[in-house]
Image: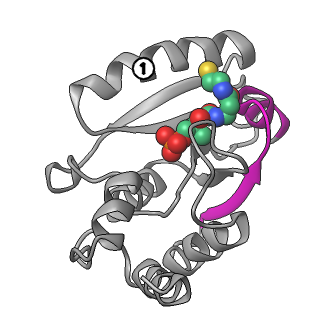
Amino acid sequence: MKPSDGAVRMTHAVYPGSFDPPTNGHLDVIRRAAMIFGKLTVAVVVNPQKREPMFTLEEREAMLRECLQDLPNVGVDHFRGLLADYVRGVDADVIVKGLRVVSDFETEMSTALMNRSLSHVDTMFFVSDQKYSFVSSSIVKEVFFLGGDVAGIVPEPVLRLMEQKRTHLGR
Ligand code: PNS
C-alpha cells in the first residue's frame, strides 16, 4: 500500500493470467478478490510464455468481460512483456494469484519474489476452492476437444465459444 496523502485511496489489485480460456476456478478467485480490493484489473497476457494460445486476445478479453459484467469494480485489460512493468504502469498496489495445489506455490513463490524485486509490488495468494483444485485451462481444452463434458468447470459464455470453435475446427 502506498503512503496516504490524506485522501482515501482504493486498493488496486491486478490478477494476471493467460485465461486461455477462463475457467470457473479463475472466476472464483476474481469474485473473492473483488470483495476485498476496491479495484481489480484482470490482466490478460498477450502472448503466453508456454504456448500459442487457442483463443485470440480479443476472444479471451470478451469472454472475461461477459462473465464479469455484474462486478462494477472489476475491469479487463491486457499486457505485453513483463508483469512487473505493467503493474508499475497502472499504479497497482498488489498482484493477485490463485494457488490450487502445493506444487503451485513452488513456482509462484519465486515469481512473486522476482516481481517484487522488479516492481516493489507484493503478491497475495488466494487458495482455490477445493472443487476447482484440479481445474486448469489446459486440462479443460484437452478434455473438451477429446469429447469430455466441461460444463461444470467453465462459465457458460466460455462453453459457447468453445463449442463454436470445435464446430469451426470440424472436430
Ligand atoms: O495463466 P498463467 O499462464 O499461469 O499466467 C502466467 C502469467 C501471465 C501470470 C505469467 O506468465 C506472467 O506474468 N507473464 C508475463 C511475463 C513476466 O513477467 N515474466 C516474469 C515473471 S517473474
**Residue 163 percent coordinates (x, y):** 43, 86
The residue nearer to you, when weighing 72 against 99, is 99
Residue 154 colored magenta?
no
Where, by quadrant of the figure, is residue 78 drawn?
Answer: bottom right
Q: In the figure, 145 relative to 101: above or below?
A: below
Residue 77 colored magenta?
yes
The answer to whether residue 115 of the structure is visible from this angle is: yes
Considering every residue shown, the one lying at the far left of the view is: 130
Colour scheme: one colour
What stretch of residues is rendered in magenta?
A: 73-89
- For the N terminus, give its image quadrant: top right
At 71% across and 46% down in the image, what residue appears? Answer: 47
Identify residue type, mark 1. Answer: Thr
- For the C terminus, give its image quadrant: bottom left
The answer to whether residue 93 of the structure is visible from this angle is: no
**Residue 125 percent coordinates (x, y):** 39, 32
Image-based side of 91 in relation to 96, left or right: right
- The residue tagged 1 is 107
Q: Quadrant of ligand 1?
A: top right
At 52% across and 26% down in the image, what residue appears? Answer: 123
Where, by quadrant of the figure, is residue 107 drawn?
Answer: top left
Q: In the figure, 127 relative to 146: above or below?
A: above
Dot 1 falls on a residue whose secondary structure is helix
Q: Residues within 10 Å of mark 1 (few under 14, many from 20)?
A: few
**Residue 119 percent coordinates (x, y):** 73, 19
At 80% across and 29% down in the image, what residue appears? Answer: 85
**Residue 100 percent coordinates (x, y):** 27, 39
Considering every residue shown, the one lying at the far front of the view is: 170
Q: In the figure, 159 relative to 97: above or below?
A: below
